[in-house]
Image: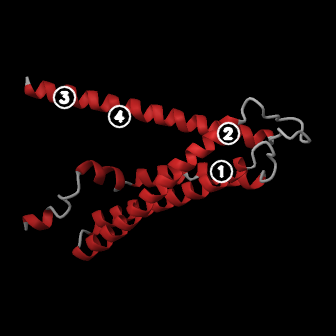
């Protein structure tokens, strides 16, 4: 009977709390807005940035990969929720297979997106000093909304990395402090 009560003991508690919650599902659905906007801006302004033709393409590819990543992560969350609710051997095997396949694909996509992010930085920041946002006949022209959106997306990405690092450091400090108090 004890084995039946602890079918999910092999999964760390924080993972179950995060990936098994409806809250995470809602946050992921809200985050879908960003790649949808990237696709929309990239598609709407395709060919309107002669100074760097790759900027709208960057947004389209990033948006498509971001959309796929979030949808695949939603699949993982749904698999965890199914696993938590059902807790049968068949469900566990099915959920584990889904999760493993999706994680492998997400890992490969993350490697590509990292390289693509670096390319986007080169394309967007590389023309920052010479871009002309007003004169459409200029060879240095880039549609204002397109360029400013792409620039803002990169800045927001860096800000989110800094915030994430700060939160991780803060959490580590709290854990170290807690461990130190327990030893004392």
Say which label, 4 or 1, has the lower sequence index: 1
Dot 2 corresponds to which residue?
A: 124
- Which callout, 4 or 3, points to the residue nearer the camera? 4
Which residue does the image show at 18% across and 28% down from the upper left?
178
- Is residue 151 shown above or below 10? above
- Which callout, 1 or 3, points to the residue nearer the camera? 1
Say which label, 2 or 3, has the lower sequence index: 2
- Crowdedness near tag 4: few (<14), some (14–19) or many (≥20) residues, C-alpha within 10 Å: few
Dot 3 corresponds to which residue?
A: 178
Q: Residue furthest top?
A: 184
Question: Residues under labels 4 and 1: Cα distance?
Answer: 29 Å
Question: Residues under labels 2 and 1: Cα distance?
Answer: 9 Å
Q: Position of residue 180 (x, y in %)?
A: 14, 25
Question: Residues under labels 4 and 2: Cα distance?
Answer: 29 Å
Q: Secondary structure at mark 3?
A: helix
Say which label, 4 or 3, has the lower sequence index: 4
Q: Nearer the viewer, residue 101 or 85?
A: 101
Dot 1 corresponds to which residue?
A: 58
Query: Do the residues bearing badges 2 and 3 touch, measured as CB atoms within 8 Å?
Result: no
């Amino acid at each position: 009977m004890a084995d039946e009560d602890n079918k999910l003991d092999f999964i760390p508690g924080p993972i179950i709390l995060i990936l098994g919650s409806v809250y995470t599902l809602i946050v992921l659905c809200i985050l879908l807005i960003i790649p949808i906007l990237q696709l929309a801006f990239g598609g709407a302004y395709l060919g309107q940035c002669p100074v760097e033709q790759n900027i709208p393409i960057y947004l389209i590819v990033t948006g498509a990969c971001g959309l796929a990543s979030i949808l695949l992560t939603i699949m993982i969350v749904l698999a965890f929720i199914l696993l938590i609710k059902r807790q049968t051997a068949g469900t566990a095997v099915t959920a584990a297979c889904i999760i493993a396949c999706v994680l492998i694909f997400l890992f490969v996509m993350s490697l590509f997106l990292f390289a693509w992010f670096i390319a986007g930085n080169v394309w967007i920041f590389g023309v920052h000093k010479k871009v002309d946002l007003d004169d459409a006949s200029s060879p240095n022209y880039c549609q204002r909304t397109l360029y400013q959106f792409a620039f803002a997306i990169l800045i927001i990405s860096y800000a989110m990395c800094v915030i994430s690092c700060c939160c991780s450091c803060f959490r580590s400090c709290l854990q170290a402090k807690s461990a130190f108090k327990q030893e004392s």
